[in-house]
Amino acid sequence: MRLSARLLVPCLAAVLLAGCGMRFVYTQLDWLLPWYARDYVTLEPVQRSELDRRLGALLDWHCRDQLPAYVVLLRDAQAALRDGPVTAARLEEFLLRGEALWDRLMQAVAPDAAGLLAELSDAQVAELGAAFERRNAEAREEFLEGRPADLRERRIARMEKRLQRWFGRLNAAQRARIGEWNNALMLDGEAWLARRVAWQQALLAALEQRADRAALAREVEALLRTPQEGWTAEYRAQAAYNREQTLALLADIANSATPRQRKHLLAEVGGLAGQFDGLACRAPAGQAA
């Protein structure tokens, strides 16, 4: 169920932080998510059916109750970007609204996630732990291993790719600004990976006591809604600083956009809002559509 959170992350977070290109068709999630879940755990037929049932209800609720707020958020962001210039503080206001929508989604996801996790067998829990280890090794190879200069170039390339999705081709000054952003970041890849592993270990520990469904539900909700509770003071400070640097970068890129880039950006944001606004959502059971 964690992918559902990432794919349904409030749209503005994608616009502002360019963190997950959202060129997906919303109605495809009902078949995409079960396949993703099986990347971590091999589900039995009964479990797969239960996942489909819970996921269908969750997506129906999200489409009816949450997407309208996403559309408003995107339209407001589009207006601010059109009227410009924008400040980092203004962008953070939108981001905070997006994070509030994220929390509401996690609140809705948590009971279903806990219910599904409670039905895992010992073998499936072990499979989940092995999948975590495999993905962590892949993350270490991609983000931590290599010469410092190579890691720097890969970070810059990732950010350029994300921004080009929204602005189109970047110019030399904008690429130089991304380099300045990268140089200013407080980077501690080992701390990032340790935080990720700690979250996974907390989930696996909760699953060892999954016979107590109430306790499992509380732990799953806490892990989904407040993962930062396990952060050290130093890591919190680094995360806050890097967030400030990234918002400043995005404000600078937006304010330096050429007319062509601005047209591209507004079309992308408006197009995404239009896609969500045009979706037909199923009415709750017992009500007319």
Image (cartoon, rainbow, N blue to C red):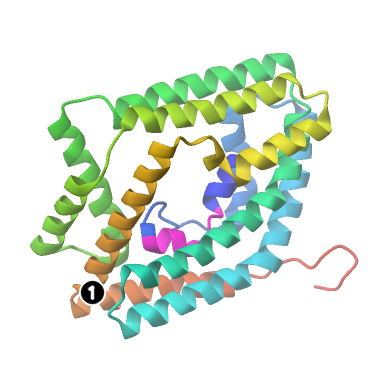
When the figure is inspected, residue 276 is found, relative to residue 29, above or below; the finding is below
Q: Magenta segment, which residues?
A: 8-16
Residue 44: give x, y in percent of width and height.
74, 25
The residue located at (72%, 15%) in the rendering is 122
Expressed as whole percent of the image width and height from the top left, the position of residue 74 reads: 48, 73
Residue lying furthest bottom: 83
Left or right of 288, for residue 234: left
Q: How many marks?
A: 1
Three-letter amino acid code at disc 1? Asn
Residue that carries the numbered disc 1 in the rendered image? 255
264 relative position to 195: left or right:
left
Q: Residue placed farthest to the front in the image? A: 233
Left/right placement of residue 183 relative to residue 145 reads left
Whether residue 267 is situated above or below residue 61 in the rendered picture = below
Residue 8 visible, this angle = yes
The answer, for residue 52, to whether it is visible in the render is: no
Q: In percent of the image, x 62 and y 38: which residue is there?
A: 223
Q: Position of residue 124 (x, y in %)?
A: 68, 19
Q: Return the residue nearer the eye: 57 or 214.
A: 214
Determine the main secondary structure of the stretch shown in magenta: helix
- Whether the magenta-drawn stretch holds residue 256 is answered as no
Task: Residue 253 in the image: state x and y as whole percent.
Answer: 23, 66
Placement of 58 over or under 92, stated as above or below: above
* Screen quadrant of the N terminus: top right
Toward the right, the furthest residue is: 286
Q: Nearer the viewer, residue 231 or 128?
A: 231
| Residue drawn at 32 percent across, 57 percent down | 244
- The residue that appears at 76% across and 43% down in the rendered structure is 111
